Structures are given as structure tokens and as C-alpha cells.
Image (cartoon, rainbow, N blue to C red):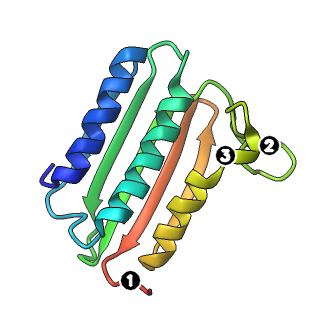
Amino acid sequence: CDNDLLNTIIIRFKQQCKKCGTSLMTDIRSKCIDFLSEHDITTLFSNLLENAVESTRNVPNSFIELTVTPHINENLTIITMINSCSKNPFSTNNRRLISTKQNKWRHGYGIKSIQRIAKKYNGNTQIYYEPQSSTFHTVIVLNKEQTQ
């Protein structure tokens, strides 16, 4: 893409994906994230990709697809992440995500950080599991006109 910082983040995760046999495909359109601070780019994409890589471990033929595109409304950017996921990561009772990491008390901040950034940019986050395709979906809408 046209953002050096995001390229560095993607290359780091591409190497991780290669080690565990996961394919990583990206489609990041030009100038879609120019309004994000370097801190927000790092937090947002590192957490998205870290969660996706973790989810695809030990899943045969696993994949991660990341797209960043402008919306028809030129002030909006849509970030979509779809990744393989062997089982539903939500608890059955309250639809909260269940961490697969050993120390569950010290995890779960990644999704909260993603949601905080979406809120900062007058956006929103939708996450869901699709059982028919065994995929986890994250859709983030960001507005170039931030609230804070």
C-alpha cells in the first residue's frame, strides 16, 4: 500500500503467516488511512492481524483477507478482515469473545483497542462468526472527521 508504516506491519504478519501456513491477502486502496495517526495505525492493524493469525493457527488451508477501501461517502473508510476460525470464538451465554491464550486475565484488550479507535473516528465495529464457512469477520467503519 502507499503507507510505509502499514507495509511494515503487514510484512511482519506475512512472515508469521508463512511460518504457520496461512495465506495473507491484502487489498489496501490508496490514501484510505492518511487521516489516522501512526499510533492508531499501529494499534488498529497490529491488533487485527494478531487476532487473525492467532485464530488461524492449526487450521488447515487457513487464510486471512484484509481490505481497506473508501466508501461512496468520501469521508468514510471501510476496513474488512475475514479469517479462518475453526470454532465459534463467542461464549454461548453473552456473546463475548473467549480468549484462546493461556492467561485469559491479561488478554482481551486488542478488540477493546480496535473499538476505541473506531469510536475516536466516529465509526463503529462489527464482529461475527460465520459457521457455514468457519470464518470470523471484522468490519470497521472510520470517519475522517474524528470526535476527539
Name the amino acid, label 2. Ser
Query: Which one is earlier in the sequence, the residue at label 2 or at label 1?
Result: 2
Q: Position of residue 112 (x, y in %)?
A: 60, 60
The quadrant of the rendering that contains the C terminus is bottom left
Residue 145 falls in which quadrant of the image?
bottom left
Number of numbered discs on residues: 3
Task: Tell me which residue sits at (45%, 61%) in the image.
Answer: 140
Residue 15 falls in which quadrant of the image?
top left
Query: Which one is earlier in the sequence, the residue at label 3 or at label 1?
Result: 3
Name the amino acid, label 1. Gln
Task: Tell me which residue sits at (31%, 66%) in the image.
Answer: 77
Residue indicated by mark 2: 91
**Relative vertical location of residue 135 with respect to residue 33 in this rendering, above or below:** above
Residue indicated by mark 3: 107
Q: Nearer the viewer, mark 3 or mark 1?
A: 3
Q: How far is disc 3 from disc 2 in space, using C-alphas?
A: 15 Å
* Mark 1 element type: loop
Q: Is residue 122 left or right of residue 65?
A: right
Residue indicated by mark 1: 146
Name the amino acid, label 3. His
Q: Nearer the viewer, mark 3 or mark 2?
A: 3
Query: Which one is earlier in the sequence, the residue at label 3 or at label 2?
Result: 2
Q: Position of residue 111 (x, y in %)?
A: 58, 54
Q: Is residue 61 left or right of residue 136?
A: left
Q: Furthest residue to the right?
A: 93
Q: Which mark is residue 37?
A: none
Task: Tell me which residue sits at (33%, 59%) in the image.
Answer: 41
* Mark 3 element type: loop
Nearer the observer, 17 or 43: 43
Number of other residues with Cα within 10 Å of mark 2, as a class: few under 14, some 14 to 19, many 20 or more: few
